[in-house]
Amino acid sequence: AITEPGPQETRLFTWGGGAHGALGHDNEEDVYTPKVVEALDNDSILMQQIVCGGSHMALLAVDNSPPEPHGRQRAMTVSKLQVNDDDRTAMCLWTWGCGMLGQLGHNSFDDCHVPKYVEMLGSKVVRQVACGAAHTVAIV
């Protein structure tokens, strides 16, 4: 669930089966009540879409910050809050959870227990994302 922007800004909550890190809480524990995904609990992040796969998730968020060097997590900053055809603010894709078939797009088959920026898409503007049981697709 993504909350509406407000005094504490947009926040992502997940709950349910945590196998493969699917919930993004940096572990594989099941969660029985909604819990904030702390890796994304940052008031400069404007989340647009969350999609669930079989054991993984994908998130589209507004981002116009450069990638962090040396593979560190990419920091997100927001300077524009609306995204449309005339506004090329980057819609960046983040994925996490089960990666055993490469569905996370991180050039590996490893699981990821926290949201991670999909660097393989480079500077492409992602417009929409969908997940299946063991795959992810994006419109750029």
Image (spheres, rainbow, N blue to C red):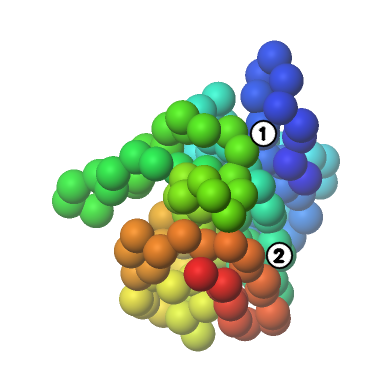
Residue 116 is at least partly visible in this image: no
Alpha-carbon distance for marks 1 and 2?
Answer: 16 Å
Q: Is residue 29 left or right of residue 102?
A: right
Around disc 2, counting alpha carbons within 10 Å, would you say few (fewer than 14), some (14 to 19), or many (20 or more)?
some
Q: Amino acid at mark 2?
A: Cys
User: Helix, strand or loop at disc 2?
Assistant: strand
Camera sees residue 97: yes
Residue under numbered circle 1:
11
Give the numbered dot on residue 52: 2
Q: Quadrant of residue 6?
A: top right
Q: In the rendered view, would you say 72 is above or below 16? A: above
Residue with the most extreme left position: 70
Mark 1 Cα-neighbour bin, 10 Å: few <14, some 14–19, many ≥20:
many
Do the numbered discs 1 and 2 sit on residues whose CB atoms are within 8 Å? no
Q: Position of residue 43 (x, y in %)?
A: 55, 25
Tag 1 secondary structure: loop
- Return the x and y of residue 107 as percentages of the image width and height: 34, 76
Query: Which is nearer the N-term, disc 1 or disc 2?
Result: 1
Q: Where, by quadrant of the figure, is residue 108 drawn?
A: bottom left
Instruction: Kindly identify the amino acid type of the residue bearing the numbered disc 1.
Output: Arg
Judging depth in this view, the residue of 7 and 85 nearest the camera is 85
Quadrant assignment, res 53: bottom right
Q: Quadrant of the N terminus?
A: top right
